[in-house]
Image (cartoon, coloured by chain):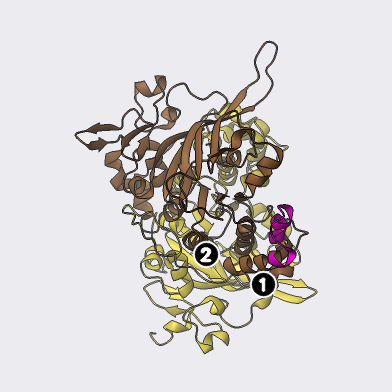
């Protein structure tokens, strides 16, 4: 894995000024607002934030899977220089599962219960690579072995309900990696799993990345997972990017009050537990709904260093480290 | 009201066994039996939190439900306030339930979507006939304030609350009858990290202010370290380690406990921790035919031939610290555990 401290290398996936809006009777809801980030070959980028911050919507936008009545209202999604935002349905179908694939949070609902595991892994192989039925089956067994499924020759004919949660997520990864995609989007792949199985799935993702050089976009709200998996981090809040930088920068000296809060409120394992435990630092309140977002900073109501300016305009990005950028008025004067 | 007598434990579970009948056998074959809980014993002291930790399928939820008498107990006893709950029926059991309440994992499916928030908290008071209507209303107001909700939110329906607020509502409902013990089944696993801290702080505050006792079920060691006073680690229906919080987290002894702790990703750990992690391969074995010897043997990084043959008993190695492993030894008051040298690197 390589770190990208310089911008000399061309990004593999480049999301520029992406906005997604949902039109309804109440008006237009801005779900994503001016999102920009880049993903380089072979790296892991984490999208971090609470539920409702737009992480999953960003992933769906990249896959062009935004549900009705949502649409990309602005911006571009460039994969190897091609703008996916303007692709037709037929064109994007050639990309999905082939160049970019995605794994979901709940492996039970994401797998089709009436098709065998083998059928589901073979589908992208036959579709994108034109393999015959028997070739696809042989390849599917190979892929199942590569995701460490024991007795792959037998498991291939089983159905999702016959597998444990961890195995289902392995099958999801096998499906996603079948065509050796450039980018793998993993949307909270371990939230529904035990911690021991989570460790196995993370190991597997790292292993697949090392072997195939896939870039991974990992969506999570767990700063522990960020620390363990990612090279770079993009912190999202209220449909906007509030901070980004190298994982080491973000974890060592988080700049945005939201990022600081996310790191502080995670209970850490302490090898010297004391009898008195101080309260966990908490971020008060909840994520604002899409209707409550205006031009102001969406975090203003929960922020402990809020200024009058924050309620007026959303701040531009200020550079606070070699690659660290933060959208917060606190850093205006430092720059 | 809450009894402040600290000499006897509030809840005392002895040799609890819960077996479920599985698939029917074929001709002449007996029906399969799922050994969900197999001989579990623990105490919950007054005003303290006992955490039960384990993976899915370890029997931790079944243990919690059988304490509430919500699943049939195969054998063993559950003493609560000195009363054996195991054989209570009908009205006598209902009276005891007033002192035993439950908070569920999923804040979405555990609230009736067609009941208003105030009514949700009021219902247990009505069902158990506690107080006059006026007192009940005041109680509901007080509970809303206690869990950090506004009184005017009583008219709202569950879908109008966020996940964290719904869990607060669940806590308020559990507190309504002033129970001696609240059983929390993974109360924060479904919540976002920022909201999780709010709910954990709330539970700790309630314990400080009211001397509330909790039985806390979880799979997340970091959450458990924050919330518990005592801990029992379960694996495939049995307790493999039991200690106080301080003793356990400063020195976990059972290989499974060490592995569970090393599985938690931490902010400070990063890739280094991940690389040094104690890897557990595969899933736990089936509880239908649990392995003969130590149930953890098949996944244990320190497995020895003896483990496959002889089941280790849960024994007290230091005062108050019990572990079920053949290879935890005491020599001249020095405890040695199989994964000692890996603890430093992996936690």
Considering depth in this image, is A20 or A272 the residue closer to the camera? A272
Badge 1 sits on which subunit?
A: B
User: Is B98 rendered above or below residue B24?
Assistant: below
Residue bearing the label numbered 2: B198
Q: Main secondary structure of the magenta part?
A: helix
Badge 2 or badge 1: first in the primary sequence: 1
Q: Position of residue B251 (x, y in %)?
A: 31, 44
| Disc 2 and disc 1 on one polypeptide chain | yes
User: Is B29 rendered above or below residue B17?
Assistant: above
Q: Colour of chain A?
A: yellow
Extreme right residue here? Answer: A25
| Residue B102 visible in the current orientation | yes
The tag on residue B151 is 1
- Magenta region, residue range: B120-135
Residues at discs 2 and 1 in contact (Cβ within 8 Å): no
The tag on residue B195 is none
- The residue depicted at 38 percent of the width and 85 percent of the height is A334
Q: Colour of chain B?
A: brown
Q: Secondary structure at mark 2?
A: helix
């Amino acid at each position: 894995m390589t770190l990208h401290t310089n911008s000399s290398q061309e990004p593999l996936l480049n999301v520029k000024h992406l906005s997604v809006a949902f039109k309804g009777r109440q008006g237009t809801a801005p779900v994503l607002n001016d999102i920009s980030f880049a993903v380089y070959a072979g790296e892991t980028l984490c999208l971090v934030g609470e539920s409702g911050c737009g992480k999953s919507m960003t992933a769906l936008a990249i896959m062009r899977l935004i549900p009705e009545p949502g649409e990309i209202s602005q911006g571009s999604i460039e994969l190897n220089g091609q703008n996916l935002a303007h692709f037709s349905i037929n064109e994007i179908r050639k990309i999905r599962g082939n160049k970019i694939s995605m794994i979901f949070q709940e492996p039970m609902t994401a797998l089709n219960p009436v098709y065998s595991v083998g059928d589901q892994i073979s589908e992208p192989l036959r579709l994108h690579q034109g393999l015959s039925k028997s070739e696809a089956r042989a390849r599917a067994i190979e892929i199942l072995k590569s995701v460490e499924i024991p007795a792959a020759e037998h498991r291939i004919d089983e159905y999702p309900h016959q597998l444990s949660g961890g195995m289902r997520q392995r099958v999801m990864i096998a499906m996603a990696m079948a065509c050796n995609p450039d980018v793998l989007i993993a949307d909270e792949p371990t939230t529904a799993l035990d911690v021991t199985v989570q460790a196995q799935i993370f190991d597997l993702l790292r292993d697949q990345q090392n072997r195939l050089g896939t870039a991974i976009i990992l969506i999570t709200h767990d700063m522990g997972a960020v620390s363990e998996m990612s090279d770079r981090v993009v912190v999202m809040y209220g449909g906007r990017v509030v901070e980004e930088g190298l994982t080491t920068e973000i974890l060592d000296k988080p700049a945005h009050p939201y990022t600081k809060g996310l790191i502080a409120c995670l209970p850490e394992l302490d090898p010297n537990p004391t009898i008195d435990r101080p309260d966990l630092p908490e971020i008060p309140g909840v994520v604002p709904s899409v209707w409550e977002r205006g031009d102001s900073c969406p975090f203003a109501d929960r922020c402990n260093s809020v200024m009058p300016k924050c309620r007026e305009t959303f701040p531009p990005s200020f550079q606070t480290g070699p690659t660290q950028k933060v959208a917060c008025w606190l850093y205006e004067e430092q720059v | 009201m809450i009894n402040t007598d600290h000499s006897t434990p509030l809840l005392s579970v002895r040799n609890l066994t819960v077996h479920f009948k599985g698939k029917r056998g074929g001709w002449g074959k007996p029906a399969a039996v799922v050994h969900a809980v197999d001989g579990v014993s623990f105490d919950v002291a007054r005003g303290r939190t006992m955490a039960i930790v384990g993976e899915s399928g370890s029997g931790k939820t079944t243990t919690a439900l059988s304490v509430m008498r919500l699943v049939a107990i195969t054998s063993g006893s559950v003493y609560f306030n000195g009363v054996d709950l195991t054989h209570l029926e009908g009205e006598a059991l209902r009276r005891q339930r007033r002192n035993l309440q439950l908070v569920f994992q999923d804040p979405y499916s555990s609230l009736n979507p067609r009941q208003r928030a105030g009514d949700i908290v009021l219902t247990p008071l009505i069902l158990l006939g506690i107080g006059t209507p006026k007192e009940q209303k005041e109680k509901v107001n007080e509970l809303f304030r206690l869990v950090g909700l506004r009184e005017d939110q009583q008219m709202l329906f569950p879908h109008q609350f966020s996940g964290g607020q719904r869990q607060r509502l669940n806590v308020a409902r559990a507190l309504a009858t002033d129970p001696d013990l609240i059983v929390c089944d993974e109360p924060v696993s479904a919540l976002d990290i920022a909201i999780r801290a709010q709910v954990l702080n709330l539970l700790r505050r309630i314990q400080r202010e009211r001397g509330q006792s909790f039985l806390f079920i979880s799979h997340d060691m970091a959450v458990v370290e924050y919330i518990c006073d005592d801990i029992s680690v379960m694996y495939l229906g049995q307790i493999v380690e039991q200690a106080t919080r301080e003793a356990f987290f400063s020195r976990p002894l059972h290989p499974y406990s060490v592995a569970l702790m090393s599985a938690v990703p931490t902010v400070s750990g990063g890739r280094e921790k991940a690389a040094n992690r104690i890897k557990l391969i595969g899933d736990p074995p089936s509880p239908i035919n649990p392995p003969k010897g130590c149930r953890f043997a098949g996944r244990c990084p320190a497995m020895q031939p003896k483990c496959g043959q002889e089941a280790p008993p849960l024994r007290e190695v230091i005062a108050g610290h019990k572990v079920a492993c053949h290879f935890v030894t005491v020599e001249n008051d020095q405890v040695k555990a199989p994964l000692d040298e890996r603890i430093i690197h992996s936690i």
